[in-house]
Amino acid sequence: MQPSNSPSLAGQSRLAGSGWHAACPECAETWKLSGGERVVVRAVRAADAEKERAFVQALSRESRYYRFLTGGRVSDEVIDLFIESNAGLALVVTAEVDGLPVIVANGNYVVTPGEDGEVGEFAVAVADDWQGKGIGRRLIQRLRDAAVGAGLHRLRGDVLSENRRMLALMREFGFSTRRNPEDSLLYEVSLVLGELAGYSAQQAVARLLPA
């Protein structure tokens, strides 16, 4: 999945005062996975830059292709944008591997203007060894909840047509799917958030407060 890299200034202004990332940058949540592993999800930090590069470089060619639409090397500029952008929300999932915390998944949305309101262009990626454990599903839930709390109108993204598992998950979450009119290899997935508007930014933060 490939989000847009064109943040809206209006989105930056409004998100500066609401949502998980701004309201509680140190909040974290521990997830217990289906195999018994424990991971932590939190907002990305500037200090994560090297860990994020290592995460992206360790992805298989297929996983990089599904996430970045290229199986080759991902530029430092793309990784830096994920770390540094404040026009939306960026999350990382960490786990202890050989006693050290490493990033095993990430997800983000970037706010862009839309005809009916602001749109969150979102994407997620999960390390190959950690796929199939429910991490991607939970990341999408958190991004959705945060987008609702921030008052966004819609979430959207692009999914490669061959990425059937992601397309099935999108439909399960209620996203509409249609062929991208500009690229037949992609499906555009979209979820209108209006019906979820009762979910507040405060509730999203409360779920992540340390116990």
Image: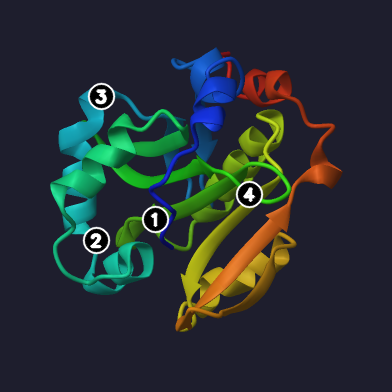
Residue 82 x/y as whole percent: 32, 40
Question: Going 52% across and 51% down the picture, which residue do you hit?
Answer: 121
Of the image marks 1 and 3, the number of the one nearer the N terminus: 3
Which-is-in-front pick, marks 3 and 4? 4
Looking at the picture, how far across and down is residue 198, in whole percent? 84, 32
Image location of residue 161, percent across then percent down: 49, 82
Find residue 114 and name its label.
4
Label 3 neighbour load within 10 Å: few <14, some 14-19, many 20+: few
From mark 4 to mark 1, how far is it between C-alphas?
25 Å
Which label number is shown at residue 67?
Answer: none
Q: Residues within 10 Å of mark 2 (few under 14, many from 20)?
A: some
Q: Helix, strand, or loop for circle 3?
A: helix
Circles 2 and 3: CB distance less than 8 Å? no
Cβ atoms at labels 1 and 2 below 8 Å apart: yes
Residue 207 versus residue 3 in the image, above or below:
above
The answer to whether 200 is drawn above or below residue 110 in the figure is above
Per the image, the residue denoted by label 3 is: 46
Name the residue located 43 percent from the left edge and 53 percent from the top edge: 4
Q: CA distance from mark 2 to mark 3?
A: 21 Å
Q: Earlier in the sequence, mark 2 or mark 3?
A: 3
Residue at image position (32%, 69%) is: 69
Residue 57 in the figure: left or right of residue 210: left
In this orientation, does residue 79 appear? yes
Q: Which of the two marks, 2 or 3, is nearer to us in this view?
A: 3
Q: CA distance from mark 1 to mark 3?
A: 19 Å
Type of amino acid under label 1: Ala
Lower sequence index among marks 3 and 4: 3
Q: What residue appears at the point 66 percent right and 18 percent down from the top-left corner?
A: 206
Query: Which residue carries the number 2 mark?
Result: 59
Mark 1 lies on residue = 125
Q: Residues within 10 Å of mark 1 (few under 14, many from 20)?
A: many
